[in-house]
Amino acid sequence: MPEVIAGIAELRERLEPARRRGESIGLVPTMGALHKGHARLLGTARRECDLVVASVFVNPMQFDRPEDLENYPRTMEHDLRVCENSGVDLVFAPAASELYPREQLTFVESPALSAHLCGAHRPGHFRGVATVVLKLFNIVQPDRAYFGEKDAQQLAVIRRMVDDLNLPVKVAPVATVREEDGLALSSRNKHLTQEQRAIAPVLSWALRLAADRIGRGERSVEAVRREALELFAPYPEARVEYFEVTDPLTLQPLERIEGPVLIAGAMWLGSTRLIDNMFRP
Ligand code: AMP
């Protein structure tokens, strides 16, 4: 089993000799409930770094709904097995009181990047994400940090934070792992009923249809959206929160498609919210 460390000072002490030996350190931040998507991040880090640290921390600051935080799956024993199978060296699993010993008065904000997509519907979410990731970067001081393309807006926010704040870390994006029917793996998929699970891949189908239309030369976002949204019609239980075609770097919604785009969507099934996206070069 990988070594599990809950304290910041202890982790720093444990990492110091490796750093002095010139070993490269890879960090994979997670909220646990690990699945094959996380395993791909861990496996990529294992191949590219001498020492792999996975963090498992359900970050209260990034939850905009108390019931989502409360119901978030916590599966530590299983997570440790996934980490072991992926060759993780150290698991950093702090209590909330370790990362937030007193009221946090300093935050990382990226208002322009958080104005649309998930940011428009989850107030404070990306501020919570960017703030905790900066804390983790400062605690672990990794050479490389791994993030899934599944959370495209999160990836964009982190990349820009690293650039704008001159952080000495390389952000490594990892492709989305999907079920055979297209559904992107997510810890929240556990909450789906059998009926909801059967409907869930429709979001990925709509994204694929949109990417396909753009690939065939459609330039109007309105036309692409209209066609993609029709796919949801047979499934009234699936409530689309947003379905947008945006600039992949600024995440601003587009009207005309004239270059690479990020197509991103969010959908509710009951009280479970699922997101997915596709990049179209
Ligand atoms: P989470 O535990 O949901 O915060 O996710 C931790 C990391 O795993 C994030 O960088 C996610 O983007 C990434 N991730 C989550 N699901 C997937 C997936 N299906 N494929 C690839 N990466 C993923």
Image (cartoon, rainbow, N blue to C red):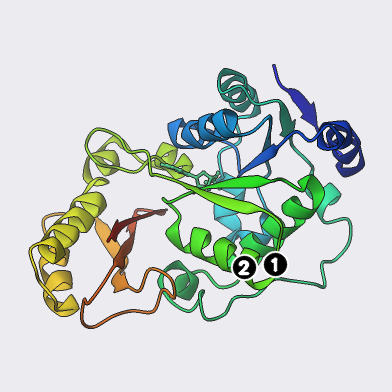
Q: Give the labeled residue for mark 2.
A: 163
- From the viewer's perspective, tell me whether residue 31 is left or right of residue 182: right
Q: Quadrant of the N terminus?
A: top right
Three-letter amino acid code at the position of disc 1: Asn
The answer, for residue 77, to whether it is visible in the render is: yes
Does 279 sit above or below residue 96? below
Mark sitting on residue 224? none
Ligand 1 has an atom within 8 Å of the beta carbon of the residue at disc 2: no
Q: Residue at x 52, y 81 (%)?
A: 112
Percent x, y of residue 194: 28, 35
Tell which of 45 and 136 is nearer to you.
Answer: 45
Q: Which residue is drawn at 19% across and 76% down?
A: 221
Tag 1 and tag 2, C-beta contact below 8 Å: yes
Tell which of 41 and 260 is nearer to you.
Answer: 260
Q: Which residue is drawn at 10% across and 67% down?
A: 227
Percent x, y of residue 62: 62, 60
Between the C-alphas of marks 1 and 2, the distance is 5 Å
Percent x, y of residue 30: 60, 43
Q: Quadrant of the C terminus?
A: bottom left
- From the viewer's perspective, tell me whether residue 156 is left or right of residue 262: right
Percent x, y of residue 114: 51, 74
Of helix, strand and loop, which one carries label 1? Answer: loop
- From the viewer's perspective, tell me whether residue 273 is left or right of residue 259: right
- From the viewer's perspective, tell me whether residue 217 is left or right of residue 62: left
Q: Residue at x 46, y 72 (%)?
A: 121
The answer, for residue 64, to whether it is visible in the render is: no
Q: Disc count in the image? A: 2
Mark sitting on residue 166? 1
Of helix, strand and loop, which one carries label 2? Answer: helix
Residue 116, located in which quarter of the rendered image? bottom left
Does 221 sit above or below residue 280? below
